[in-house]
Image (tube, helix red, strand yellow):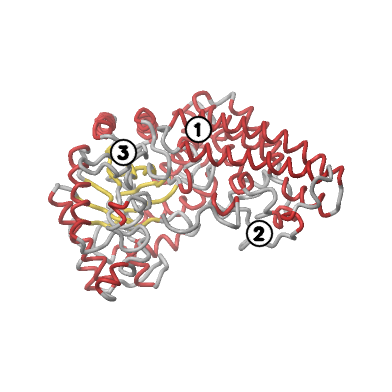
Amino acid sequence: MKQQTYERFGVMLDMSRNAVMKVEQVKRMIDCLQKMGYNALELYCEDTYEIESEPYFGYMRGRYTAAELKEMDKYATAHGIELIPCIQTLAHFTALVRHACYKKLMDADDILMIDEPATYELIEKMFKTLSECFTSRNINIGMDEAHMVGLGRFLDKNGYQNRFEILVRHLNRVADIAAKYGFKAHMWSDMFFRIATGGAYSAAEIPEDIKKKVPKNVELTYWDYYHQNKEHYDGMIESHLKFGKDVWFAGGAWSWLGFAPLGDYSLRTMKPAMESVREKGVKNVIITMWGDDGKECSFFSLLHVLYAIRQYAEGNFDQEKIERGFYTIFHIKYADFALLDLPNLDDYNDTICWQKQPCKALLYTDPFMGVFDKTVATHRPIPYAEYTKTLALAAKRVKEYSYIFDMEAKLCDALTIKAELGVKLRRAYQSKDKRALSICVKDCAVLKKRLAAFHKAFYTLWNKENKPQGWEVQDIRIGGLIQRIDTCMNRLKDYMAGKTENIPELEEDVLQVLDGQQISMNNYAKLVSYSGLHFGTI
């Protein structure tokens, strides 16, 4: 296969899911990317950048100031990295919805109201700000996953309209604003395919008249980090090429399912993706790193994956050469970084799939509610004690990245008890085994200390990499877990002492959760209660 030449080969960092990286840490990532052969970096900011005359835009979210954006842009340019703004201009304005001044701009959920003059006034302010802060005149304008576009307040006001027509009408308005400020845009492409297929992001025939209405200064970005067969990527790239434009491809280094990365799964999906990219001549590639539901995972935990993907893109699939190359750059063994997958692995011989991220699910699932207890009871125990030792030893070898390994080691230490606590509690209670219950009480006391140690290690990681805004969520989650363990422990003591007749939650037999064979749920609210954490409207 001929050598592929890329115009841009970059990474996208999510700065909108609780964590906004400190400026010096973005610079640190730029240094790493430069060493690995990357030449672009997208900063995904839904609302986390400062806009003049919009005080609630990114309010208390750690938003970047104009000075900070300019500082990062200057540093990136000096190191051969194109810093590209990656924003939203249609959906994913979840943080803005809580503010009355923006709620009135919404169609449905977190989707902007199309055709509303105030919508485009806000979007113009976005472009004006970004044009002043970034040297690059490339911009990612988002527009993904707007599933309910045209079906909320827009429908009430205008009646039903062809959703393709609504989408391209809005896209042209945004493209005109982009052009006014000298930007060439690219956008996530999924809504074209979702409308055509009735919801699926899969190969489809888009109406010719719709393809012709896509503005000249807008290119489509096909994003996919789920498939392990090259044929799927081939088919989707071909569908995109029918728009008659250059296609961007966005893959993924899985950083968005809890505290630990899914490095192995990332490579299983990106290897065939890069084979397809090379064969189809795609010249712009971005590897996304998201932070869904709290952004617990360090982006630096996937450096080895980013290096391997970059090598795949050059046609190097020789694992030994890749590992040697990584060591030459970072002076740390590739295999040590690969250990950061451990908290999500069943055991050393089990391969991981994207549905499985037990380290978060088993940490937060309530010990009395039994969300995953039906599965855990029949599941081979995860060797978290062994993982604790392995990660703690590795922490001594990985130099500046030891804090990431230390956090995961402390997490696994807590999970050594927490992972099976609910199953043991219910089994002991329902069999009226007071001796086993007393052991559970002692386990709870030890667990509280281990959770405190994990909290401290996680704070060290967060405080090093991210601005303080957003940490309050982690304080509340982990602090709430510690308090909940304390409450459960005290209720067990009262029951054993005869102060209460029963523990109602443990009287119930647990039911299997949907897709319960996978210990996975990247949704904190659903892990801690069947009742939910919020009711009514704000």
Q: Quadrant of residue 247?
A: bottom left
Q: Tag 1 or tag 3, which sits nearer the N-term?
A: 3
- The dot on residue 17 is none
Q: Amino acid at mark 3?
A: Asn
Could you tell me which quadrant the C terminus lies in?
bottom left
Q: Is residue 494 left or right of residue 530?
A: right
Residue 303 visible to an observer of this rendering = no
> What is the C-alpha distance between the residues marked 3 and 1?
22 Å
SS type, badge 1: helix
SS type, badge 3: loop
x, y percent for residue 320: 53, 38
Q: Toward the viewer: 243 or 362?
A: 362
Residue 313 visible to an observer of this rendering = yes
Residue density around tag 3, few if under 14, some if 14–19, many if 20 or more, within 10 Å: many
The residue pinned by badge 1 equals: 324
Q: Is residue 344 left or right of residue 178?
A: right
Q: Is residue 454 left or right of residue 209?
A: right
